[in-house]
Amino acid sequence: MNIDLIFQVAGVGIVVAVLYQLLSRAGRDEQALMVTIAGLIAVLFIITGEIGDLFDSIKQIFGL
Amino acid sequence: MIRIIGALMLMSASAAAGVYMSSRLKKRADSLDGFASALEYLKTRICFADTALEKALRAAGDMMNDGRIFYSAADNMNADGIKKAWRHAVINSADTLCLTAADVQTVSALGNRLGLTDAEDQKRNIDAVLAALSARRAQAHEAYDKNGRLFRGCGILCGALAALLLI
Protein backbone atom coordinates (compact mmCIF):
# COMPACT_ATOMS: atom_id res chain seq x y z
CA MET A 1 0.00 0.00 0.00
CA ASN A 2 1.20 3.47 -0.86
CA ILE A 3 2.26 5.35 2.30
CA ASP A 4 1.26 8.65 0.67
CA LEU A 5 -2.35 7.53 0.93
CA ILE A 6 -2.12 7.47 4.73
CA PHE A 7 -0.65 10.98 4.81
CA GLN A 8 -3.33 12.19 2.39
CA VAL A 9 -6.13 10.81 4.56
CA ALA A 10 -4.48 12.23 7.69
CA GLY A 11 -4.18 15.64 6.01
CA VAL A 12 -7.84 15.62 4.98
CA GLY A 13 -8.77 14.64 8.54
CA ILE A 14 -6.78 17.51 10.06
CA VAL A 15 -8.15 20.11 7.63
CA VAL A 16 -11.74 18.90 8.11
CA ALA A 17 -11.32 18.98 11.90
CA VAL A 18 -10.04 22.57 11.81
CA LEU A 19 -12.84 23.60 9.41
CA TYR A 20 -15.39 21.99 11.73
CA GLN A 21 -14.07 23.95 14.71
CA LEU A 22 -13.97 27.19 12.72
CA LEU A 23 -17.53 26.81 11.46
CA SER A 24 -19.05 25.62 14.73
CA ARG A 25 -17.48 28.53 16.64
CA ALA A 26 -18.99 30.92 14.11
CA GLY A 27 -22.41 29.43 14.88
CA ARG A 28 -22.66 27.57 11.58
CA ASP A 29 -23.19 24.08 12.96
CA GLU A 30 -25.09 22.83 9.91
CA GLN A 31 -22.30 23.78 7.53
CA ALA A 32 -19.77 22.24 9.94
CA LEU A 33 -21.68 18.95 9.80
CA MET A 34 -21.85 19.14 5.99
CA VAL A 35 -18.08 19.68 5.77
CA THR A 36 -17.49 16.69 8.05
CA ILE A 37 -19.73 14.47 5.93
CA ALA A 38 -18.10 15.77 2.71
CA GLY A 39 -14.66 14.97 4.18
CA LEU A 40 -15.80 11.47 5.11
CA ILE A 41 -17.16 10.84 1.62
CA ALA A 42 -13.97 12.23 0.04
CA VAL A 43 -11.81 9.91 2.17
CA LEU A 44 -14.07 6.94 1.34
CA PHE A 45 -13.58 7.68 -2.38
CA ILE A 46 -9.80 7.83 -1.86
CA ILE A 47 -9.63 4.47 -0.10
CA THR A 48 -12.24 2.62 -2.21
CA GLY A 49 -9.52 0.80 -4.16
CA GLU A 50 -7.76 -0.28 -0.97
CA ILE A 51 -11.01 -1.59 0.54
CA GLY A 52 -11.56 -3.61 -2.65
CA ASP A 53 -8.05 -5.07 -2.30
CA LEU A 54 -8.78 -5.89 1.36
CA PHE A 55 -11.90 -7.85 0.43
CA ASP A 56 -10.00 -9.68 -2.32
CA SER A 57 -7.29 -10.63 0.20
CA ILE A 58 -9.89 -11.87 2.69
CA LYS A 59 -11.52 -13.97 -0.03
CA GLN A 60 -8.13 -15.47 -0.96
CA ILE A 61 -7.15 -16.24 2.64
CA PHE A 62 -10.40 -17.99 3.50
CA GLY A 63 -10.77 -19.57 0.04
CA LEU A 64 -14.16 -17.96 -0.61
CA MET B 1 7.58 19.80 -8.49
CA ILE B 2 4.73 20.87 -10.76
CA ARG B 3 2.25 19.28 -8.34
CA ILE B 4 3.56 21.38 -5.46
CA ILE B 5 3.36 24.55 -7.55
CA GLY B 6 -0.22 23.65 -8.55
CA ALA B 7 -1.18 22.97 -4.94
CA LEU B 8 0.34 26.28 -3.84
CA MET B 9 -1.51 28.13 -6.59
CA LEU B 10 -4.78 26.48 -5.58
CA MET B 11 -4.24 27.33 -1.92
CA SER B 12 -3.24 30.92 -2.61
CA ALA B 13 -6.22 31.47 -4.96
CA SER B 14 -8.61 30.10 -2.38
CA ALA B 15 -6.98 32.13 0.41
CA ALA B 16 -7.22 35.28 -1.73
CA ALA B 17 -10.94 34.64 -2.28
CA GLY B 18 -11.44 34.30 1.49
CA VAL B 19 -9.46 37.48 2.21
CA TYR B 20 -11.45 39.33 -0.48
CA MET B 21 -14.79 38.32 1.07
CA SER B 22 -13.51 39.30 4.52
CA SER B 23 -12.26 42.65 3.22
CA ARG B 24 -15.69 43.40 1.74
CA LEU B 25 -17.24 42.96 5.18
CA LYS B 26 -14.60 45.27 6.64
CA LYS B 27 -15.14 47.83 3.90
CA ARG B 28 -18.89 47.83 4.52
CA ALA B 29 -18.35 48.57 8.22
CA ASP B 30 -15.79 51.29 7.41
CA SER B 31 -18.06 52.84 4.76
CA LEU B 32 -20.98 53.06 7.18
CA ASP B 33 -18.73 54.54 9.90
CA GLY B 34 -17.35 57.11 7.47
CA PHE B 35 -20.84 57.88 6.23
CA ALA B 36 -22.08 58.49 9.78
CA SER B 37 -19.25 60.93 10.53
CA ALA B 38 -19.81 62.66 7.17
CA LEU B 39 -23.50 63.04 8.02
CA GLU B 40 -22.60 64.59 11.38
CA TYR B 41 -20.41 67.05 9.51
CA LEU B 42 -23.16 67.73 6.95
CA LYS B 43 -25.55 68.48 9.81
CA THR B 44 -23.05 70.93 11.31
CA ARG B 45 -22.51 72.65 7.96
CA ILE B 46 -26.24 72.98 7.28
CA CYS B 47 -27.41 73.96 10.78
CA PHE B 48 -24.55 76.02 12.19
CA ALA B 49 -22.48 77.25 9.23
CA ASP B 50 -25.48 77.96 6.97
CA THR B 51 -23.61 76.49 4.01
CA ALA B 52 -25.43 75.95 0.70
CA LEU B 53 -26.40 72.29 0.22
CA GLU B 54 -24.15 71.64 -2.78
CA LYS B 55 -21.11 73.03 -0.97
CA ALA B 56 -22.07 71.25 2.26
CA LEU B 57 -22.35 67.94 0.38
CA ARG B 58 -18.87 68.36 -1.11
CA ALA B 59 -17.46 69.25 2.32
CA ALA B 60 -19.13 66.15 3.82
CA GLY B 61 -17.69 64.05 0.98
CA ASP B 62 -14.21 65.28 1.94
CA MET B 63 -14.78 63.79 5.39
CA MET B 64 -15.06 60.25 3.97
CA ASN B 65 -12.22 58.18 2.55
CA ASP B 66 -14.42 57.56 -0.48
CA GLY B 67 -16.95 60.39 -0.60
CA ARG B 68 -18.31 59.52 -4.05
CA ILE B 69 -21.94 59.48 -2.86
CA PHE B 70 -21.74 63.09 -1.71
CA TYR B 71 -19.76 64.28 -4.75
CA SER B 72 -22.08 62.54 -7.19
CA ALA B 73 -25.18 63.97 -5.45
CA ALA B 74 -23.62 67.45 -5.47
CA ASP B 75 -22.77 67.14 -9.18
CA ASN B 76 -26.26 66.04 -10.23
CA MET B 77 -28.54 67.84 -7.76
CA ASN B 78 -29.10 70.85 -10.01
CA ALA B 79 -29.99 68.76 -13.05
CA ASP B 80 -32.03 65.93 -11.46
CA GLY B 81 -33.15 67.37 -8.14
CA ILE B 82 -31.61 66.32 -4.85
CA LYS B 83 -33.94 63.37 -4.17
CA LYS B 84 -33.25 61.65 -7.48
CA ALA B 85 -29.55 62.64 -7.49
CA TRP B 86 -29.06 61.28 -3.98
CA ARG B 87 -30.83 58.00 -4.73
CA HIS B 88 -28.82 57.46 -7.92
CA ALA B 89 -25.59 58.34 -6.13
CA VAL B 90 -26.32 55.80 -3.38
CA ILE B 91 -27.35 53.03 -5.78
CA ASN B 92 -24.34 53.62 -8.07
CA SER B 93 -21.88 53.62 -5.16
CA ALA B 94 -23.44 50.69 -3.27
CA ASP B 95 -21.26 48.01 -4.87
CA THR B 96 -18.02 49.97 -4.50
CA LEU B 97 -18.76 50.75 -0.85
CA CYS B 98 -19.97 47.15 -0.27
CA LEU B 99 -23.38 48.29 1.00
CA THR B 100 -26.26 45.80 1.30
CA ALA B 101 -29.82 46.43 0.09
CA ALA B 102 -30.89 47.36 3.63
CA ASP B 103 -27.97 49.83 3.91
CA VAL B 104 -28.95 51.40 0.58
CA GLN B 105 -32.54 51.80 1.78
CA THR B 106 -31.40 53.45 5.03
CA VAL B 107 -28.95 55.81 3.32
CA SER B 108 -31.42 56.63 0.50
CA ALA B 109 -33.97 57.83 3.07
CA LEU B 110 -31.81 60.92 3.64
CA GLY B 111 -32.61 62.23 0.16
CA ASN B 112 -36.38 62.36 0.74
CA ARG B 113 -36.29 65.63 2.70
CA LEU B 114 -32.75 66.86 2.09
CA GLY B 115 -32.65 70.53 1.12
CA LEU B 116 -36.43 70.93 1.05
CA THR B 117 -37.13 72.45 4.48
CA ASP B 118 -35.54 74.72 7.10
CA ALA B 119 -32.34 73.97 9.01
CA GLU B 120 -34.18 72.62 12.05
CA ASP B 121 -36.06 70.07 9.96
CA GLN B 122 -32.84 69.15 8.15
CA LYS B 123 -31.27 68.45 11.54
CA ARG B 124 -34.20 66.20 12.51
CA ASN B 125 -33.99 64.39 9.15
CA ILE B 126 -30.24 63.77 9.49
CA ASP B 127 -30.66 62.68 13.12
CA ALA B 128 -33.32 60.18 12.08
CA VAL B 129 -31.05 58.75 9.38
CA LEU B 130 -28.13 58.61 11.84
CA ALA B 131 -30.29 56.70 14.34
CA ALA B 132 -31.28 54.18 11.66
CA LEU B 133 -27.69 54.02 10.48
CA SER B 134 -26.35 53.19 13.94
CA ALA B 135 -28.27 49.90 13.88
CA ARG B 136 -26.85 49.11 10.43
CA ARG B 137 -23.33 49.99 11.66
CA ALA B 138 -23.68 47.71 14.68
CA GLN B 139 -24.89 44.92 12.42
CA ALA B 140 -22.00 45.49 9.96
CA HIS B 141 -19.40 45.35 12.75
CA GLU B 142 -21.00 42.23 14.19
CA ALA B 143 -21.00 40.58 10.75
CA TYR B 144 -17.32 41.42 10.31
CA ASP B 145 -16.38 40.16 13.80
CA LYS B 146 -18.34 36.96 13.26
CA ASN B 147 -17.60 36.17 9.63
CA GLY B 148 -14.36 38.02 8.79
CA ARG B 149 -12.09 35.48 10.44
CA LEU B 150 -14.32 32.64 9.25
CA PHE B 151 -13.97 33.64 5.58
CA ARG B 152 -10.20 34.03 5.85
CA GLY B 153 -9.82 30.68 7.62
CA CYS B 154 -12.20 28.86 5.31
CA GLY B 155 -10.44 30.29 2.25
CA ILE B 156 -7.08 28.88 3.26
CA LEU B 157 -8.45 25.58 4.55
CA CYS B 158 -10.69 24.92 1.53
CA GLY B 159 -7.67 25.48 -0.70
CA ALA B 160 -5.63 23.08 1.42
CA LEU B 161 -8.42 20.48 1.30
CA ALA B 162 -8.77 20.74 -2.49
CA ALA B 163 -4.98 20.50 -2.90
CA LEU B 164 -4.84 17.44 -0.63
CA LEU B 165 -7.60 15.69 -2.55
CA LEU B 166 -6.09 16.45 -5.96
CA ILE B 167 -2.41 15.88 -5.19
Image (cartoon, coloured by chain):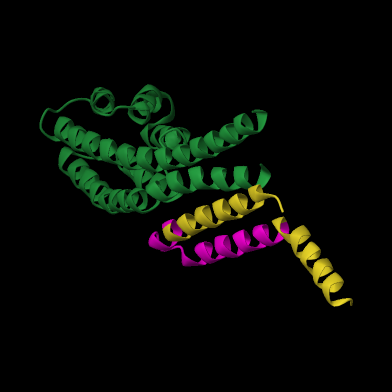
Chain colours: A yellow, B green
For the residue pair B147 and B94, the one nearer the viewer reads as B147
- Check residue A26 for magenta coloring: yes
Q: In this view, does B91 lie to the left or right of B116?
A: right
Q: Name the image quarter holding residue B69.
A: top left
For the residue pair B124 and B155, the one nearer the viewer reads as B155
Which residue shows up at 48% across the image and 48% down it? B154
Which residue shows up at 48% across the image and 60% down it? A20
The percent coordinates of residue B45 (x first, y second) are 16, 30
The percent coordinates of residue B127 (x first, y second) are 20, 47
Please indicate, yes or no, whether residue B98 appears anywhere in the rendered image. Answer: no
- In magenta, the rendered stretch is A22-45
The percent coordinates of residue B46 (x first, y second) are 18, 32
Which residue shows up at 85% across the image and 73% down it? A59
Most extreme residue toward the left is B48
Q: Is residue B38 left or right of residue A14?
A: left
- Check residue B76 for magenta coloring: no
Which residue shows up at 36% across the image and 54% down it? B146
Q: Name the image quarter holding residue A44.
A: bottom right
Quadrant, the N terminus of chain B? top right
Quadrant, the C terminus of chain B? top right
Most extreme residue toward the right is A64
For the residue pair B165 and B120, the one nearer the viewer reads as B165
Our reading of the magenta stretch's main secondary structure is helix
Q: In this view, does B120 lie to the left or right of B149?
A: left
